[in-house]
Amino acid sequence: MSSTQKTTPPTMGETVYGQIAGLLTSGRVAPGERLSLRDLAERLGTSTMPIRAAVGRLAEYGALEVSPNRAIRVPVMSGSRFAELSDLRQQMEGLAAERAATAATPQDIAAIARIEAAFAGTVARANPDGGRAVALNRDLHFAIYAAARMPLLFGMIERLWLLAGPVLNLDMRADPRRLANTPAPRFHAAALAALRAHDGPAARAAIAGDIADAAAFILARGVLKED
């Protein structure tokens, strides 16, 4: 885009949708958590009208449930559905990481490195902030996927994270010992090294390994709904 072109500012509806989607993808709401239009409006500082539209859109994707009495809930996911979701994520996010290894610019890699360092520093603390760790994990993954410059794939990955994000609470927030012992920093460091080396297969393996490890931990805990 040239310096004379102007980007169109997002509408209120787009902004509100992005904010609610961010609550889901960054794990700030948990499976089974009940929400209300009024609470969301107060949290986001807006009226209920754009909230209602955003909630309806997210319900179409399966990221929220709206009952006949208009109650809103984050879906409770079954073990089999989560396992399928994790398999899809490994394939799609692995592909994005592989492409990012050849498409990422030095500026992309520098930004990814800053997030990687912030995440590693957060989980290394004596009393790590689980919420911050979840958000940084999300930011790191999406910075890598954006660097692939594949907008269709990026959009598909965003849809998967709308479903997966709340479940990640069960991984990084539920048990402080998980953050102390998580291999995520190792996978993240391997992904960053692969991007710097322009090694697509290694980048794919690092991201897929990160997703697979988190999924195995969550499934082993037996906290997801039975089929």
Image (cartoon, rainbow, N blue to C red):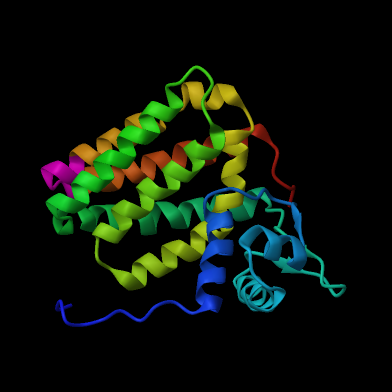
Q: Quadrant location of residue 151?
A: bottom left
**Going by the image, does 49 lie left or right of 123?**
right
Q: Residue at x 68, y 73 (%)?
A: 47
Q: Is residue 5 above or below residue 45?
A: below
Whether residue 172 appears in this view of the structure is no
Query: Which residue is depicted at the point 62% across and 74% down?
Result: 54
Image side of residue 73 versus residue 215, left or right: right
Foreground residue among 114 and 94: 114
Q: Main secondary structure of the magenta part?
A: helix
Instruction: Report the span colored magenta.
Output: 194-200
Q: Position of residue 101 (x, y in %)?
A: 18, 52
Q: Position of residue 69 (x, y in %)?
A: 87, 73
Could you tell whether 131 is left or right of 139 in the image? right
Furthest-right residue in this view: 69
User: Left or right of 128: which side holds 183?
Assistant: left
Q: Residue at x 24, y 53 (%)?
A: 98
